[in-house]
Amino acid sequence: MTQKISGAKTKAKLEPKPDRKGRRRRSRELALQGLYQWFVAGGTVQAIEKQLHETREFLKTDEEYFSDLIQGTLTNLTELEKHIQPYLDRPIKELSPVEFSVLLLSTYELASHPEIPYRVIINEAVVLAKIYGGTDGHKYVNGVLDKLATQLRAEEVALQV
């Protein structure tokens, strides 16, 4: 019996895992990378977008959604910052570039994509913050976006309560 169990484990390890990431999540990841690059190294939106288009990962994205995310976020940067700042416990400049980028990206989605449920946007932001951010950055992102959703999606939030 032990041999069968061992054999089953070995066989399971050899089978490829299914790709569970959706095209939209990959678009968000790539847009997050672009925003991070923009904040840390600078450059134009067009140059960063072109560079990301050339990556292997880009083939697995929703190209239109990716472009909307990165261009929409950077085009509306000042307005998005105004939405976020009241829910922060510190100045924006003191946030890590990853957490700030996740907050900007998610705020843009909350404001510009009402067809996507706010809970989905927050969940995706938390996942990105867990993967790319600091140890407890995802908790901070979750708290800020929960409060922000009550402002940007008041009717939808009220229906969920």
Image (tube, rainbow, N blue to C red):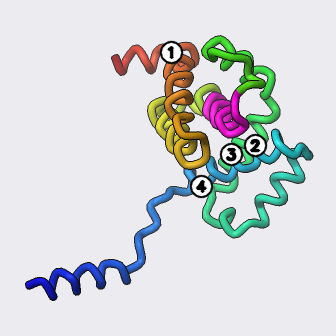
The three-letter code of the residue at mark 1 reads Thr
Residue tagged by mark 3?
A: 32
Which residue corresponds to the image point at 36% horizontal and 21% vertical from the top-left?
Answer: 160
Classify 142 as above or below 61: above
Residue tagged by mark 2?
A: 35
Task: Specify whether residue 147 is in view.
Answer: yes
Where residue 107 sits, quadrant-wise, is top right
Q: Which residues are magenta?
A: 95-108
The three-letter code of the residue at mark 4 reads Arg
Could you tell me how far apart the alpha carbons at marks 4 and 2 are, in whole angstroms? 14 Å
Pointer 1 local density, CA inside 10 Å: few below 14, some 14–19, many at least 20:
some
Element type where label 4 sits in the image: helix
The answer to whether mark 4 and mark 1 are in CB contact below 8 A is no
Q: Which mark is residue 26?
A: 4
Of mark 4 and mark 1, the one earlier in the sequence is 4
Residue tagged by mark 1?
A: 150
Task: Please state which of the two labelled residues, at mark 4 or mark 2, is closer to the viewer.
Answer: 2
The three-letter code of the residue at mark 3 reads Leu
Which residue corresponds to the image point at 74% horizontal and 35% vertical from the top-left?
Answer: 73
Task: Specify whether residue 112 is in view.
Answer: no
Element type where label 2 sits in the image: helix
Could you tell me how far apart the alpha carbons at marks 4 and 3 are, in whole angstroms? 10 Å
Which residue corresponds to the image point at 66% horizontal and 48% vertical from the top-left?
Answer: 65
Give left or right: position of 55 versus 115: right
Of mark 4 and mark 2, the one earlier in the sequence is 4
Of mark 2 and mark 1, the one earlier in the sequence is 2
Where residue 108 sits, quadrant-wise, is top right
